[in-house]
Image: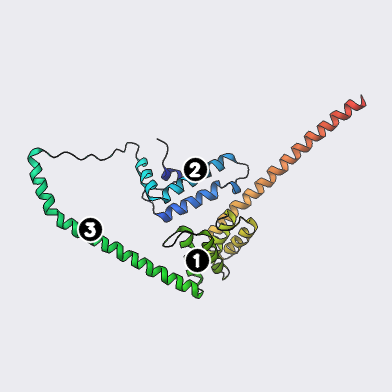
Amino acid sequence: MSESDYEILGIDRNATQDEINRAFRRMARKYHPDLNLGNAEAAKQFKICKNAYDNLRDQKTREQSWQGWDFDWQPEQKEKPKPKQKRKQKERKRVCTPDKEKQQRVEKRTRKREKEQSQVKLQAVVHAATKGNAEAQHCLGWRYEEGKGVPEDKAEAVKWYRLAAEQGYDEAQNSLGRCYIFGEGVPQDKATGIKWLRKAAKAGNEEAKELLQEMSWTISTGGWRNLICGLTIACIVLAMVLYWLRDAIL
């Protein structure tokens, strides 16, 4: 069996959704085609990582990938009760049923309470963001980007990131710069993305510094590659001209 989606992203199968998102961003910075110009292997690896990330975002495919983690995994088989124990087992089920129903009711109330608390937190974040709180605006943008408590909407995420970034919030500046560089929620614009990343790096954001360093290395490497290709073509043209002149003189 091929390696699982967890192994592709380099995470444990018990990883949370936030850890999965961070792992994909790390892989994107490493293999994104814009950061690896002319590298077909990096582009292929990026597609593999993107497919694994899409699978793990969906609960059903994530469960399938979980099963694929263990190469010897097989469905659990229940042992058939012996004829003499069949009556005792039925009596035991009859005794345990009220407790199970009670446990299910408790779990249902707990899930409902957690959902209500989550909605209250979301309303508080929206209220604070509307009032102009930069941290709340960035948090709301992250919720829209990841689909946490609200429908996933990259464009709406960029809107809130920009409001927080214009107030000098470095996390929002880093997020906004990343959206521009990778074209998430806005048309791809590397110049604008680098501008916001530099502001975030100047404010001390480590993630922005790392991304800028990776991009500067890629740009410098691409420049040398273009220079070498240009010199090679020039040498070929010069050789052809000299060969033509030799034939013309002779």
Residue at point 56%, 47% (across, down)? 32
Q: Name the residue under label 3.
A: 104
| Marks 1/2: CA–CA distance | 29 Å
Q: In this view, does 215 lie above or below 195?
A: above
Is there CB contact under 8 Å for labels 1 and 2? no
- In depth, the one of 209 and 136 nearer the eye is 136
For the residue labelled by badge 2, is the local secondary structure a helix, a strand or a loop? helix
Residue at point 8%, 44% (across, down)? 87
Q: In this view, does 163 lie above or below 215?
A: below
For the residue labelled by badge 1, is the local secondary structure a helix, a strand or a loop? helix
Pointer 1: residues within 10 angstroms few (<14), some, or many (20+)? many
The first of marks 1 and 2 along the sequence is: 2
| Marks 2/3: CA–CA distance | 40 Å
Q: Where does residue 215 sit, x and y in percent of width and height?
A: 61, 52
Q: What residue type is labelled 2?
A: Ile
Q: What residue type is labelled 3?
A: Gln
Q: In this view, does 96 lie above or below 236?
A: below
Q: Residue 43 carries which label?
A: none
Pointer 2: residues within 10 angstroms few (<14), some, or many (20+)? some
Q: Where does residue 158 sit, x and y in percent of width and height?
A: 54, 62
* For residue 139, side relative to residue 98 (left or right): right
Q: Where does residue 17 sit, x and y in percent of width and height?
A: 41, 54
| Marks 1/3: CA–CA distance | 37 Å
Is there CB contact under 8 Å for labels 1 and 3? no
Quadrant of the rendering where the N terminus is positioned:
top left
Look at discs 1 and 3 and give the one toward the viewer: 3
Q: Mark 2 points at which residue?
A: 48
Q: Mark 1 points at which residue?
A: 138
* For residue 74, side relative to residue 101 (left or right): right
Residue at point 9%, 38% (across, down)? 83
The first of marks 2 and 3 along the sequence is: 2
Q: What residue type is labelled 1?
A: His
